[in-house]
Amino acid sequence: MSAALPVTPAGWEAAARAALSPEAWAYYAGGAADEVTLEDNVAAWRRWALRSRVLVDVTEVDTATTLLGVPRPHPLLVAPTAFHRGLHAGAEPETLRGSARADAIFCLSTSATTTPAELAAAEPGAPRWFQLYLRGGLDGGVRMLAPLADLGYEAVVVTVDLPVLGVRDRERALPWDPEPAPSTIAASGEAPYVLDARGLETLVAASPVPLLVKGVLDARDARTAVETGAAGVVVSNHGGRQLDTVLATADVLPEVAAEVGRDVDVLVDGGVRRGTDVVAAMALGARGVLIGRPCLWGLAVGGADGVQAVLTQLLDEVRVALALLGVGHATDLSAAHVTRAPWR
């Protein structure tokens, strides 16, 4: 990897902004309306303070965890995000190469510029999940699920927080018309299918791989997802891009984990920028942490090397945080290691 690559979250963001047009930046960096939730997603992790212990042997620390019952070397995943070709000519295969080098699961978006089959062919051995938007109704969703296992996808994440597209002022002020256009629900001309519990049961039954529900911001919805057979839930507000002023994910995670964490895996995304954020998320009950925009900035700045560097820097910070907390194994993190910060 190039020694010239940034080493801080702010550095990656600034370098990516310099590399992109104002219109492209508005598309990738923007949020809903006044972007209150977009900003608070980052700030909310700082409202948790870490409680450290000493006199513990942390000569070696272990970041390993399990996701859906499968051992993983660490809890990081690359979150599903749209249209990577707008950031790098190598598109999603380039992102996958970087994530694979960091031993991170890559979650391919339905709104990608690469099909599931093309991505599987690009890096056959790389760990990958698929994120599902329902196009063509419930039957269309079932058809999209059918080939995933044969293509090597380990899980599917169905996004449930997009019955309509959020109000995105930055995108409206600086419209972007990339070529080829991203295959978003809005761009497709199809009305989004509004998924209810019965429809979710149908998808769970039809999926050849474990299915997780993404877009949960309430413990009651997490319980509904479990009761319909979901293998996991992702606490997410769509990166602050849907409904502004909803709660930040760091504030919702504890109640969701308390409700269903014994029954399914709980994952979280939104605003994670530092290894301390990852450690706090795991202490609050998350088994996996999805990284969104930082990986996009890595892709824009350095391609696969940039994605790898972003994830590697985060993991290095996780290891340091575990050692300074006096925690030898990431799976030993618990609510005892966090408290509401006095500076909040």
Image: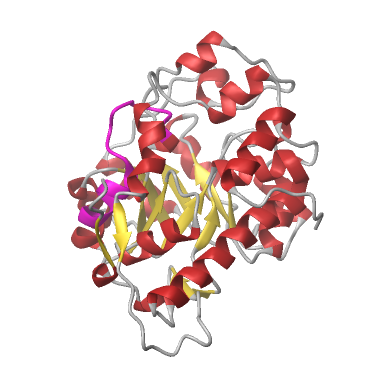
Q: Is residue 143 left or right of residue 88?
A: left
Residue 258, magenta (yes or no): no
Q: Is residue 294 above or below residue 170?
A: below
Q: How is the image coloured?
A: secondary structure
Q: Nearer the viewer, residue 334 or 224?
A: 334
263 is higher (above) or lower (below) than 16: below
8 versus 28 height, above or below? below
In the shown orientation, is residue 162 left or right of residue 131? left
Q: Is residue 236 visible?
A: yes
How far from the left and from the top, in percent, is residue 160?
Answer: 36, 38
Relative to 6, is 189 above or below? above
Locate the N terminus by quadrant: bottom right
71 left or right, relative to 183: left
Q: Residue at x 66, y 52 (%)?
A: 7
Most foreground residue, 75 or 314: 314
Q: Which residue occupies 39% across, 74% down?
A: 325
What residue is shown at x 51% (from left), y 71% (from top)? 320
Magenta region: 240-256
Q: Residue 110 location, x and y as percent?
A: 56, 38
The quadrant of the image that shows the C terminus is: top left
The picture places residue 308, in percent across and down from the top left corner, at 69, 57
Asked whether residue 231 appears in the rendered view, the answer is no
Q: Is 131 placed left or right of 102 in the picture? A: left
Q: Is residue 249 magenta?
A: yes
User: Which image quadrant for residue 66?
Assistant: bottom left
